[in-house]
Amino acid sequence: MTFAFDEIQVTEVPSGTIVRLIIKDTLKKEDYEHFVPMVEKIMESRDKIRMVIELRDFKGWSAGAMWEDTKFGLSHFNDIDRLAIVGDKQWEKTMAAFIKPFTTATVKYFDLETLDAANAWISE
């Protein structure tokens, strides 16, 4: 079975813990079943985390994945301090704005060309 996400990276910086998800293609429910437990395990031992979601050649979510994403957002409403969404399409920027009501995190969108700026912002 192949998954839409390539990897999960965890980095400790003075400002906290950064979890980076690199996602390609279309997210499916099975992807969430695989990576959500990993992210939740990281969250267990931290007050809050920061996340970078890097979307590369992203085509969207399946219906089941959208539901899993909504459940994750509601379950971890207060667990994320900052969320950087990095992508290359206008609709991804719109999705970043859509996410804001489902989290107390500060959410910002960055184009792939400005990945360095996203990394600097998430590490502040």
Image: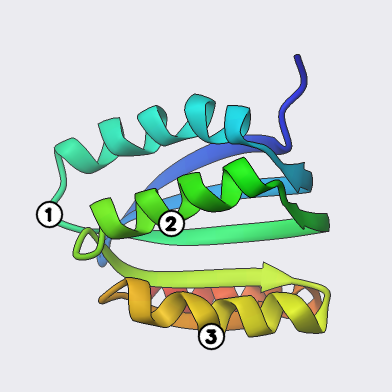
Point out the frontmost of discs 3 and 2: 2
Q: Which residue is mark 2?
A: 70
Q: Residue placed at 30% from the left, 37% from the top?
A: 40
Q: Which residue is mark 1?
A: 47
CA distance separating discs 2 and 1: 21 Å
Residue 44 left/right relative to 67:
left
Q: Is label 1 in a helix, a strand or a loop?
A: loop
Asked if the residues shown at circle 3 and circle 2 are in contact, with their CB atoms under 8 angstroms apart, the answer is: no
CA distance separating discs 3 and 2: 14 Å
Residue 22 against residue 29 in the figure, above or below:
below
Residue 104 occupies which quadrant of the picture?
Answer: bottom left
Q: Nearer the viewer, residue 81 or 72?
A: 72
Residue located farthest toward the front when viewing the structure as drawn: 63
Q: Which residue is mark 3?
A: 97
Number of callouts in the render?
3
CA distance separating discs 3 and 1: 24 Å
Q: Residue placed at 56% from the left, 78% from the top?
A: 96
Residue located farthest toward the top when viewing the structure as drawn: 1
Other residues around mark 2 within 10 Å, as few (<14) / some (14–19) / many (≥20):
few
Q: Which mark is residue 35?
A: none
Q: Nearer the viewer, residue 16 or 34?
A: 34
**Quadrant occupied by the N terminus:** top right
Residue 80 at what x, y percent from top left?
A: 29, 63
Q: Earlier in the sequence, mark 3 or mark 2?
A: 2
Residue 103 left/right relative to 122:
left
Q: Earlier in the sequence, mark 2 or mark 1?
A: 1
Residue located farthest toward the right when viewing the structure as drawn: 57
Q: Residue placed at 25% from the left, 63% from the top?
A: 77
Q: Is label 2 in a helix, a strand or a loop?
A: helix
Asked if the residues shown at circle 3 and circle 1 are in contact, with their CB atoms under 8 angstroms apart, the answer is: no
Residue 20 at what x, y percent from top left?
A: 52, 50
Question: Which amino acid type is shown beneath numbered disc 3?
Answer: Ala
